[in-house]
């Protein structure tokens, strides 16, 4: 196992409130008994955090995963009152489109990077979609605190322009997300999550796959990860994104402010945070308030007057590195001059940047049901809260405030909020 020190994860045998820390090796032996597991595995400090806080919430430290999940879902209304879900012909056709999009995606990886498709894993989820598990070794992935978000960037990169993108549930790339264990039953449909060979995806119909999912299935063809090698092309993408990912740059500021550090790390971390806040065009006074609050959780805290304040002044004595401000480096330089921008605090501005970063720059079909035009996006209060480490209530209040100010408009639907920026913001986002 790569990075064996990351041996702990979170799992549950039923209700999500019954989660417990597990050793990853023990789960491998009795996985059929456990319903859900965290996507990530962690060091021993994760177990210590759970024992102290009785929850995985608030744990931001480094994590790793052997498999990069792509979760493909359809919106299927569950009318099951017991037994196996009775799929309509329309639902079968839509699931078949997901199946064909997987084949298109995998073939593109084979053609562009020369991967062996049998080294990935494929599952029918047991109800409304599929799971693809790509080996992290292909990409040369390594542990890091915001690994989920970095994986999202990688998946967006390699699926760009392919039909699979419209089916991906991007909400899975958040902290503390669960994935169903293979060969456990999805009670919503009365079917099991089952492994499928790539050759079966090529040859079986959707109804044949559903019939197979009525019982558990052995994954006898699974490949030992030790036999999987790093792919030069995919690793190059990984390294490139790692060095230039502005989204990770912004996201890391928020996570660093959420926890203190120990003796020997305080000054360096304070400088990194102060520099990042400067690059986000935060005022020195606001940065000082945030760092003083952060400093209280350090072990022990820095002396504010003689140690912390000089570090902040040193960081702000230099000009902001505007290329790190947003995913495109220019948008914030425009909106910071708007009168409405001053009405929002730092946390609100962070959430606004999250909305901007997810805005479509081309027309896209979402879930085969809605065409989302460029300059717009579909989101929910929950997804926005998870991505910005905020609360649903704050996100709801922010969206309502943006709407009142005429900065956005949105329509509520069964899919979530269809958000559209005003013409001025659309022009800025689409031109940058």
Image (cartoon, rainbow, N blue to C red):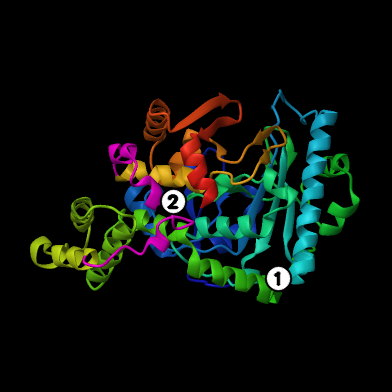
For the point 34% across and 55% down, the residue is 280
Choose the circle earlier in sequence order: 2 or 1.
Answer: 1
Confirm whether residue 214 shows in the render.
no
Q: Is residue 344 magenta?
A: yes
Q: Residue furthest right?
A: 203
Q: Position of residue 43 (x, y in %)?
A: 44, 65
Label 2, secondary structure: give it.
Answer: helix
The answer to which image quadrant residue 215 occupies is top right
Is residue 339 or residue 90 the one in the foreground?
339
Confirm whether residue 347 shows in the render.
yes
Q: Position of residue 345 (x, y in %)?
A: 29, 41
Asked whether the beta carbons under mark 2 and mark 1 sit within 8 Å of each other, the answer is no
| Figure check: 324 above or below 11 | below
For the point 77% across and 31% down, the residue is 84
Label 1, secondary structure: give it.
Answer: loop
In this picture, residue 76 sits left or right of residue 220: left
- Please rate how many residues cluster around mark 1, counting C-alpha atoms within 10 Å: few if below 14, some from 14 to 19, many from 20: few
- Please rate how many residues cluster around mark 2, counting C-alpha atoms within 10 Å: few if below 14, some from 14 to 19, many from 20: many
Q: Please give the residue where the numbered disc 2 appears in the rendered image.
A: 331
Marks 2, 1: nearer the viewer:
2
| Figure check: 89 above or below 428 | above
In this picture, residue 323 sits left or right of residue 108: left
State the extent of the magenta-drawn residues as a range.
317-345
Q: Position of residue 380 (x, y in %)?
A: 51, 34
In this picture, residue 289 sits left or right of residue 34: left
**CA distance separating discs 2 and 1:** 45 Å
Q: Please give the residue where the numbered disc 1 appears in the rendered image.
A: 224
In this picture, residue 317 sits left or right of residue 281: left
- State which quarter of the image contains the N terminus: bottom right
Is residue 313 or residue 291 the one in the foreground?
313
């Amino acid at each position: 196992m790569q990075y064996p020190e990351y041996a702990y994860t979170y799992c549950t045998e039923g209700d999500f409130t019954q989660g417990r820390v597990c050793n990853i090796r023990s789960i491998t032996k009795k996985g059929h008994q456990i319903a859900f597991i965290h996507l990530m595995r962690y060091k021993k400090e994760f177990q210590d955090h759970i024992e102290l806080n009785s929850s995985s919430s608030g744990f931001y430290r480094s994590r790793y995963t052997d498999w990069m999940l792509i979760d493909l879902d359809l919106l299927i209304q569950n009318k099951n009152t017991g037994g196996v879900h009775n799929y309509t012909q329309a639902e079968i056709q839509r699931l078949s489109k997901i199946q064909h999009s997987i084949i298109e995606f995998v073939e593109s990886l084979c053609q562009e990077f020369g991967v062996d498709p049998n080294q990935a894993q494929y599952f029918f989820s047991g109800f409304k979609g599929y799971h693809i598990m790509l080996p992290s070794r292909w990409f040369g992935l390594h542990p890091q605190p915001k690994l989920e978000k970095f994986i999202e960037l990688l998946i967006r990169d390699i699926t760009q322009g392919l039909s699979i993108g419209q089916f991906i549930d991007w909400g899975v790339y958040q902290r503390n997300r669960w994935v169903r264990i293979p060969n456990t039953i999805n009670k919503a449909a009365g079917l099991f999550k089952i492994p499928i060979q790539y050759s079966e995806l090529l040859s079986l119909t959707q109804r044949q796959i559903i019939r197979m999912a009525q019982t558990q299935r052995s994954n006898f063809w699974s490949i030992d990860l030790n036999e999987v090698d790093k792919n030069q092309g995919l690793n190059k993408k990984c390294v490139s994104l790692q060095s230039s990912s502005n989204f990770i740059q912004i996201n890391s500021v928020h996570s660093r402010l959420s926890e203190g550090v120990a003796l020997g790390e305080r000054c360096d971390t304070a400088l990194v945070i102060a520099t990042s806040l400067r690059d986000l065009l935060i005022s020195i006074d606001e940065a000082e308030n945030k760092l003083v609050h952060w400093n209280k959780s350090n072990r022990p805290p820095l002396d504010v007057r003689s140690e912390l304040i000089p570090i902040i002044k040193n960081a702000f004595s230099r000009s902001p590195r505007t290329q790190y401000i947003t995913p495109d480096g220019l948008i914030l330089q425009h909106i910071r001059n708007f009168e409405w921008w001053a009405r929002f605090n730092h946390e609100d501005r962070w959430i606004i940047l999250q909305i901007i970063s997810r805005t479509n720059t081309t027309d896209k079909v979402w879930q085969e049901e809605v065409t989302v035009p460029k300059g717009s996006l579909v989101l929910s209060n929950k997804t926005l809260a998870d991505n910005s480490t905020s609360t649903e209530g704050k996100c709801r209040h922010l969206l309502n405030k943006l709407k009142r100010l005429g900065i956005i408009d949105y329509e509520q639907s069964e899919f979530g909020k269809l958000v559209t920026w005003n013409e001025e913001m659309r022009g800025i986002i689409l031109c940058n």
